[in-house]
Image: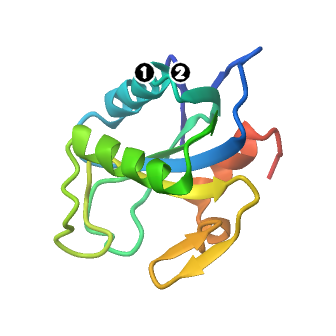
Amino acid sequence: MKLFTQHFPHIQHNSKEYNNIVVWGIGGNIGNCLKTFENLFQSLRHNSKIRLYSTSYIYKNPAFGYTTQPNFYNATITFTTNLCLRHIFTLMFYLERKFGRDRIRAFKNAPRTLDIDLIFFGNKRFRAKHLHIPHQDYHNRHSVLYPLTFQLGIVL
C-alpha cells in the first residue's frame, strides 16, 4: 500500500550538491512511523552537511523474516553530502537512537521504531563481513525496490 505524507514523496529543486550521493532505505513498525519519518526528514533538512534531493512515497508492507509482528512502513531518501562513509554510519546510528531504536536487537528482524539501511554511497563498492555497499540484498526487497523505483521515476 502506498502512503503519502507532507514530505513523502518530496523533490528538492535547485539544491546545492555535495560530492557524495547517498541513498538510504528507512523502515519501522513500532510507534507512529509516519511521524517518525517526517521527523527524520526534518532532522536531515536542518543538517548543514546534507542536502536532501528526494524521498519516495511510504510503502506499507508485511514483515519478512520474523512475520509475527506489525506491518512495516518503508521509504527511500536520497541526499548529497561531503561526509565520508564513516560519518554517514555515525549519523545513521545517531538518528536511529534519537528516534528510539535500541542498537542491540532482541533477535534478527525484530520490531523497531526506525531502521536505516545504506543502500548506495555514490558508486562505491565495498564488501566486509557485516557490510556491503551497495546493500547486498536491496534488489530482492520490495520494501526498497518499490519506493526507490518510484523515486527514480522507473515503473515496475
Q: Quick check: can you spot residue 56?
A: yes
Return the residue nearer the eye: 75 or 64.
75
Q: Quadrant of the N terminus?
A: top right
- Provide the residue designation for mark 1: 42
Residue 84 point in image, percent of width and height: 56, 50
Q: Which residue is drawn at 42% across and 21% down?
A: 42
Query: First in sequence: mark 2 or mark 1?
Result: 2
Measured from the top left, where is residue 3 in percent x and y?
52, 32
SS at circle 2 = loop
Q: 15 or 142, which lies in front?
A: 15
Residue 142 in the figure: left or right of residue 103: right
Residue shown at the point (50%, 16%) measured from the top left = 6
Above or below 129: residue 80: above
Determine crowd level at label 2: few under 14, some 14-19, many 20+ residues with C-alpha closer than 10 A. some
| Quarter occupied by residue 70 | bottom left
User: Which label is found at residue 67?
Assistant: none
For residue 105, what is the image quadrant?
bottom left
| Disc 1 element | helix
Residue that badge 2 annotates = 7
How many residues crowd mark 1 within 10 Å: few (<14), some (14–19), many (20+)? few
Q: Nearer the viewer, mark 2 or mark 1?
A: 1
Q: Do the residues labelled 2 and 1 touch (CB within 8 Å)?
A: yes
